[in-house]
Image (cartoon, grey):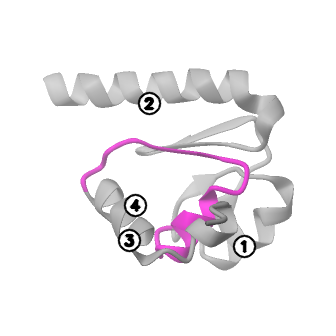
Amino acid sequence: MNLNADTLRMNKDAQHLVREIDRAQKPIAVICHAPWLLISAGLMKGHKLTSYHTMQDDVRNAGGEWIDQPVVHDRNWVSSRQPTDIPAFNRGMAELLTQAKSRKAA
């Protein structure tokens, strides 16, 4: 089975799972082409994020705001553009998980 971002985005189980995670306000972290799944799951409208630069039209067409930065935080989402942004992405994920843990403890 060839499982890549383009294949995953069309998987109904993956779409359902990410919708449930978002509905529960659990952390979602995406990098590169991973936002395709969020787009196909119908979650993009009103969100700000970044992705690989070739996806900016997809994000905008789905109702999101595409921002060209190494890391973008928006509610329970954190996103990054590409593998060279991984150090910043890791810090962003750590911050997102820390915030989620703090909310849960409160």
Relative to 31, 105 lies left or right? left
Q: What element carries label 2?
A: helix
The magenta span reads: 24-43
Residue at x-position 78% and y-position 64%: 56
Tag 3 and tag 1, C-beta contact below 8 Å: no
Q: Name the residue under label 3.
A: 13
> Foreground mark, 2 or 3?
3
Q: Is mark 3 on a helix, strand or loop?
A: helix
Report how far apart the C-alphas of labels 3 and 1 lie in the structure: 21 Å
Relative to 35, 76 lies left or right? left
Report how far apart the C-alphas of labels 2 and 4 lie in the structure: 16 Å
Q: Mark 4 points at which residue?
A: 18
Local packing at callout 4 (Cα closer than 10 Å; few below 14, some 14-19, many 20+) is some
Query: Residue 65: where, in percent of width, then height?
Result: 66, 61
Residue at x-position 76% and y-position 39%: 69
Q: Of the numbered discs in the image, which one, if any, rests on residue 14?
A: none
Q: What residue type is labelled 3?
A: Asp
Q: Name the residue under label 2.
A: 96
Give the quarter of the figure containing the N terminus.
bottom right
